[in-house]
């Protein structure tokens, strides 16, 4: 018996087939995520900021794996680039792999003491995200930032800490150039 596998297109970052779903985050879903809330609320609330394709075969069980591809669209809210909400895993010790497939951006990482650092993301880049480390993707380029991911299926998402106080750094643009803004709040 040969079973039809799911399909993963590494060029477009699209997933389809068994267990695959796609969630869409629009600017209207991202209240309080960006520094300039006035600029965010003045934008078209239906603008897509990012999409996440994900394959869930096993459910949220210990020992299982989920596979996903994030597509972060190019754009800015005020001077801040489009990005994911960012989270730390609900089961804190669960790690994750990310790898760059298309476009250019930044992976922001933050430990539980709010120490924050960054890695460049580009086609071919590979990122090990240890447990206890919050993570957020930022698109600093003109194309869609496409990033693959694989993580333990019981990891879960905790958005609360980051929703309350963000990361220690924000990725902004000034005179056409990317820079890091230190957030001491
Ligand atoms: C899941 C993994 C990714 C993110 C996705 C969206 O552990 O890290 O699939 O969920 O990049 O980010 P966020 O912060 O909105 O979940
Ligand atoms: Zn994660």
Image (cartoon, rainbow, N blue to C red):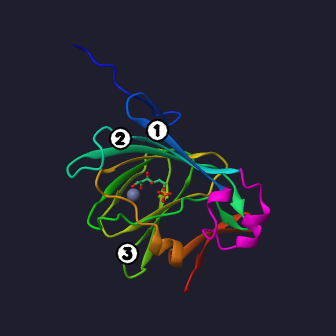
Observer able to see residue 175: no
Q: Secondary structure at mark 3?
A: loop
The residue at which mark 2 appears reads as 56
The residue under the point 73% across, 63% down is 176
**Upstream in sequence: badge 1 or badge 3:** 1
Closest to the observer: 65 or 119? Answer: 65
The residue under the point 30% across, 59% down is 95
Label 1–label 2 contact, CB within 8 A: yes
Quarter of image, ligand 2: bottom left
The residue under the point 70% across, 71% down is 37
Q: Position of residue 124 (x, y in %)?
A: 43, 45
**Does 150 sit above or below residue 84?**
above
- Mark-to-mark CA distance, 1 and 2: 8 Å
Structural crowding at the residue carrying mark 2, measured as other residues with C-alpha within 10 Å and reported as few (<14), some (14–19) or many (≥20): some
**Upstream in sequence: badge 1 or badge 2:** 1
Structural crowding at the residue carrying mark 3, measured as other residues with C-alpha within 10 Å and reported as few (<14), some (14–19) or many (≥20): some
Whether the magenta-drawn stretch holds residue 37 is answered as yes
What is the span of residues highlighted in magenta in the rendered image? 27-46
Name, please, the residue furthest toward the right: 42
The residue at which mark 3 appears reads as 111
Quadrant, the C terminus: bottom right
Q: Secondary structure at mark 2?
A: loop
The residue at which mark 1 appears reads as 21
Q: Nearer the viewer, mark 1 or mark 3?
A: 1
- Mark-to-mark CA distance, 1 and 3: 30 Å
Whether the magenta-drawn stretch holds residue 92 is answered as no
Relative to 121, is 5 on the left or the right?
A: left
Observer able to see residue 19: yes
Res 58 → quadrant: top left
Q: State how many labels appear.
A: 3
Q: Position of residue 113 (x, y in %)?
A: 38, 82
């Amino acid at each position: 018996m040969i079973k039809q596998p799911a399909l993963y297109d590494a060029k477009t970052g699209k997933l389809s087939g068994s267990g695959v779903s796609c969630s869409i985050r629009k600017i209207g879903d991202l209240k309080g995520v960006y520094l300039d809330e006035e600029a965010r609320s003045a934008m078209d609330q239906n603008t897509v900021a990012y999409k996440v394709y994900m394959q869930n075969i096993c459910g949220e069980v210990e020992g299982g794996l989920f596979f996903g591809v994030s597509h972060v669209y190019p754009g800015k809210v005020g001077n801040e680039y489009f990005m994911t909400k960012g989270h730390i895993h609900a089961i804190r010790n669960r790690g994750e792999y990310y790898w760059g497939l298309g476009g250019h951006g930044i992976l922001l990482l933050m430990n539980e003491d709010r120490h924050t650092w960054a890695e460049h993301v580009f086609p071919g880049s590979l990122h090990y995200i240890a447990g206890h480390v919050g993570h957020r993707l930022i698109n600093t380029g003109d194309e869609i930032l496409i990033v693959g991911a694989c993580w333990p299926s019981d990891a879960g998402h905790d958005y609360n800490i980051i929703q309350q106080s963000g990361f220690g750094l924000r990725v902004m643009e000034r005179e056409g150039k990317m820079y890091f803004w230190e957030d001491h709040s």
